Structure formats: C-alpha cells, structure tokens
Image (cartoon, rainbow, N blue to C red):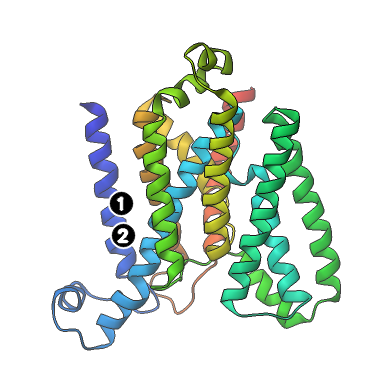
Amino acid sequence: MKRTRLYIFLLLLLIFLMILDWRTGSLWISGQAFFHALFGGSAGAYHTIIWEYRLPRILTAVFVGGGLGLSGLWMQTLFKNPIVGPYVLGLGGGAGLGVAVILMLFSLESDSWISIAAAWGSIGVLLMDIYVYQRLKSPYALLIIGIMIGAFSGSVLSILSFFAPADRLQKFVFWSMGNLALGWNAGLWIIIALVISGLFVSLFYTKYFNALLIGDDYASALGANVRFLHLLLILMSGILVGTMTSFTGTLAFVGLIAPHLAYLLFRTRLYQYMIPAVFLTGAILLVTSDFIAQLPGSDYSLPVNSITALIGAPVVIRMLWKNFR
C-alpha cells in the first residue's frame, strides 16, 4: 500500500512539473490563456507555442528521462554496481565522435546528418561491446572498453577541434549540451516506441533480472541463460541510449541517479517495483532540469545538460560517500 501511494505521488508530481514546464519559457503563459489555448480555438500564438513547441519538448523530456533511468537500471544489474550509468559502455563517446567527424571533416551541418552520424557512432561502439563480451565472456571487460573509447574519442575530438573552423566547433558544442526540442518529428516517436518496448521486455524477464541481482550462479541455478541475459541487457541499453543520444545529445547523470533515487524511495531492487519507479524518477529529473533550464521569466535558456550535471553531481558524491566510507 505504501508503494502504491509512492507511485501515485510520483505520477502526480510528474504531471504537475509537466504542466509547469508547459507554461514556462521565454513567454510565461497565464492560467487562463493556457487553458484557453489548450481547450479553445486552434488559432493564435499561444496555441502554436504550447502544442507545436513545448508539448513535444516535454514529451521528449519524459521519455528520454524515463529511458535513461531504465538503461541505468539495466547497466547496474549487469555490473551489479549502483554507481554505473547508461554511458558506461562508451556509447556517448562513440556518438560524439561520429558527430565530430561529420561536422568537422565533412561539413554536413543538418540535424538529419548529425543524428545519422551519432547513431552510426553508437552502433559501432555497441557492436564492439558485443564482440568483446562474446570473446571474453565477462561484462567487466566492457568497463575497460568504455573507458578506452572515452579516451580515444576525447583524443580525436581534441585533434579535430584544433583544426576545425569556429562555426563547426560551436555546432558540436551545442550538440554536446543536450537538446530536447525535437518537435513532432520521427525521432520523438522512435524514442517513445523504444522506451515502451524496453518497459515490456523488462517486465517479461523480471524473474531472471531479479536473479541476476543476487548473482550469476543463482540465476543459472534457476535455469536462466546468463550469457543471453547479459547480451539482452547490453543490447537493450545500447539501442535505447544510442537512439536517444543521436537525437538529443548526451544527457549526463539522469540514468545514473534515477535508479538510486528510486531505491531510496522504495527500499527494494526488485524489478517489478523498480521498473515503474526508475521511469518516473528519470522523467521527473529531466522535466525538472528542463524547467530550470528555461530560466522562468527570462529571455534566455541554459543547456539542459548543465542542469542535469548540477543536480546529479551532488547525488553521485553522496552515493560514493555512502558506499566507500
């Protein structure tokens, strides 16, 4: 019963934050104007702002935040470590490298080319991760691969940045800051479909993922194919994170701290409780970050990635202090 009340509270909090974010931006929309544009006529600037610009941005924040939370839970299950996140496999570095190459070497600056380059970079890293796991049969080798991919991509980015014109470098920096303004394009619907699919797959394999939390030997004793489960977690996280990164850029800390906050609230790591909990906490974190980034009452907006880091870094410090003191 207590958990049911917590779910209801988190859902109501998410809805409240979505409405607050919906009304916020460079133009604050009063309650009367908001509800008139929401339920009234289809003409006018307010209607265009809330339906064509702000609503898809908020839905993107909800599903990307929830998807990062799910991916963080999957990676923490794979590595049995509460302080790893969705980008531990190196997908963020691969996506960034793909975007840097397409921008700085080929001068292709359209959003479509940037998304394609980020997707191919993520796919390349995911295939490498699968190959390494198949050969070494250890998920912990993937940690080293992720670190090496980050170091390699950082080195290449430094070289490309040294020679790149200022306008292309600026474009890359803007991409790396995160962007939730996808609009009503295919990217939003792809993200929604993948997140919902991930939710259902997680629910279907709840019994075996719970067993993995205890240990691989225990999962094997229950009749689970541990290697298949490891590959499933790698694939689900890789496809989801790679897709989201290709459209929104990297969004730090959300997937790392959402499972931790969910655990603090629900005091369990069982999947049947954590799946909806991490989705809701991830969505709440990113919608809150988007609201703060809009700088209510100002004509300016901050990069959403800077806000997620501002919120997430103290939480990670607390996690480290609690686990290693």
Q: Is residue 251 left or right of residue 182?
A: right
Residue 214 horizontal side relative to residue 62, left or right: right
Q: Quadrant of the C terminus?
A: top right
Residue 30 image offset from top left, x and y in percent? 23, 75
Quarter holding the N terminus is top left
Q: Is residue 41 visible?
A: yes
Disc 1 vs disc 2: Cβ atoms closer than 8 Å? yes
Residue at x-position 21% and y-position 74%? 34
Task: Report how many numbered discs are placed on residues in the image.
Answer: 2
Which of the labelled discs sits on residue 14, or is there none?
1
Residue depicted at 15% across the width and 78% down the height: 36
11 up-or-down from 269: above or below? below
Q: Residue furthest bottom?
A: 44
Which residue type does callout 2 highlight? Met
Image location (x, y in percent) of residue 304: 52, 62
Q: Residue at x 79, y 45 (%)?
A: 148
Locate residue 54 relative to residue 224 in the image: left or right.
Answer: left
Residue 187 is situated, as x and y percent measured from the top left of the image, at 46, 66
Q: Measure the alpha-carbon separation of dots 1 and 2.
A: 6 Å
Where is mark 2, residue-wise?
Answer: 18
Question: Front-most of 10 and 192?
Answer: 192
For badge 1, the amino acid type reads Leu
At numbered mark 2, what does the secondary structure look like: helix, strand or loop? helix
